Image (cartoon, helix red, strand yellow):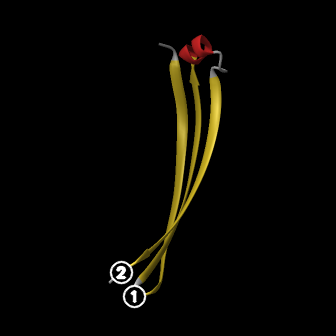
Amino acid sequence: MSEHGNAWTLALNWRPQARLRLSAEVLYIDSSRNQRRDEGLAARQTELQLQLGARVFF
């Protein structure tokens, strides 16, 4: 189907206190898929996602 791509993930976790965990994650995707053209989209797309989280432990 002529499909290929690459992805990278970077994740960081930090526990400033015993009951608290802070997290950050970055996801980068670069992909090419010819089937996207059938939907009127570009075959090659890049995406960047940033996710932040906080978790409190009881």
User: Where in the figure is residue 10, as x and y percent of width and height?
Assistant: 54, 57
Residue occupying image coordinates x 51% and y 20%: 3
User: In this orientation, which residue lies closer to the viewer: 7 or 37?
Assistant: 37
For disc 1, the neighbor class at 10 Å (few under 14, some 14 to 19, many from 20) is: few
Query: Which corner quadrant holds the C terminus?
Result: bottom left
Q: x%, y% of residue 32?
A: 58, 24
Judging depth in this view, the residue of 5 and 22 nearest the camera is: 22
Q: Earlier in the sequence, mark 2 or mark 1?
A: 1
Q: Is residue 36 above or below residue 55?
A: above
Amino acid type shown at disc 2: Phe
Marks 2 and 1, how far apart in space?
A: 8 Å
Quarter of the image holding residue 43?
top right
Q: For the residues carrying marks 2 and 1, which lies nearer the camera in this image? A: 2
Secondary structure category for the residue under label 2:
loop
Question: In the figure, is residue 40 to the left or right of 27?
Answer: right
Give whichever of 38, 5 is nearer the camera.
38
Residue under the point 62% across and 40% down: 47
**Do the numbered discs 2 and 1 sit on residues whose CB atoms are within 8 Å?**
yes
| Nearer to me, 54 or 34 | 54
Q: Position of residue 7 (x, y in %)?
A: 53, 41
- Give the secondary structure at mark 1: loop
Amino acid under label 1?
Ala
Q: Which residue is mark 2?
A: 57
The residue at which mark 1 appears reads as 18
